Amino acid sequence: MRPRDLARYLEDQGWRRSPALAPSGPSEVSDGSLAALARTAQGCTLCRLHEKRQTVVFGEGDPHAALMFIGEGPGAEEDRTGRPFVGQAGRLLDEMIFAMGFERREVYIANVVKCRPPGNRDPREDEVAACSAFLDRQIELIAPRVIVALGKPAARRLTGSNKPMGALRGHWASYRGTPLMPIFHPAYMLRTPKAKSEAWKDLKQVMRRLKKDSPLNS
């Protein structure tokens, strides 16, 4: 969704616009850097999630990462620390990243929405729409070679499909020209341990794609 489309959508919903984003959007307010976009996000009041947040969890990692992970939204620990994926699910994600041959600092980790949904519920459609310009600009600035969508909300947002997660995972899609692999969310893997082996199969596809697309192999 383009920034102007986002603004029009929010006006139709009767929401007041964030001074930080009016009248254009994050792509035109920031100075073109990821840090500037993050500063803009800190003042965002585009949806109801800002009302109870402790902090905006923008994302972290290498701003030029080849691999980007996108989850659904911050949890309680993330809301407290301002860092994505730092609870139990985050520790599992760290193990997955390490098993792929990376360190956390070498990839980029973000979420579809930057503020915690109450009770860790899934973000609602209007909340996802309100944050869409931030996520789109974030992806544009990082320009990853591969995106991994963690869980159903992220997979549906990035693929545009309403299929169940079992049908989306393990199948390559594309987000604005960037190869996209949906996999189960680490929190789901903690609840359903057998899903870990399925996720590892999917991540091995990602590893093969990264190796194939590496400049060293071109």
Image: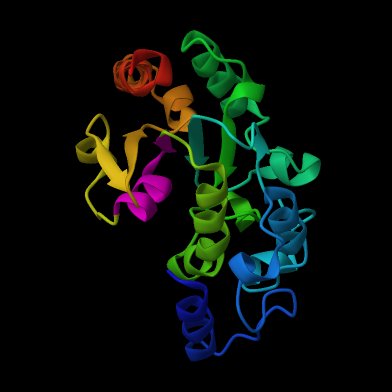
Q: Is residue 203 magenta?
A: no
Rendered view: 178 above or below 18: above
Rendered view: 157 above or below 186: below
The answer to whether 202 appears left or right of 91 in the picture is: left
Picture coordinates of residue 92, whole percent (x, y): 55, 20
Rendered view: 126 above or below 206: below
- Tally the numbered discs: 0
Picture coordinates of residue 1, whole percent (x, y): 42, 69
Residue lying at 40% horizontally and 39% vertically, measured from the top left? 151
Picture coordinates of residue 112, whole percent (x, y): 51, 52
The answer to whether 113 appears left or right of 79 in the picture is: left
Residue lying at 19% horizontally and 39% vertically, measured from the top left? 167
Residue nearer the viewer, 182 or 54:
182
Quadrant containing the C terminus in the rendered view: top left
- Which quadrant would residue 199 be assigned to in this image? top left
Which residues are the magenta region? 146-159
- Which quadrant would residue 131 be assigned to in this image? bottom right
Picture coordinates of residue 31, whole percent (x, y): 72, 61
Residue lying at 44% horizontally and 33% vertically, measured from the top left? 185
Rendered view: 126 above or below 181: below
- Which quadrant would residue 215 be assigned to in this image? top left
Residue lying at 67% horizontally and 49% vertically, measured from the top left? 34
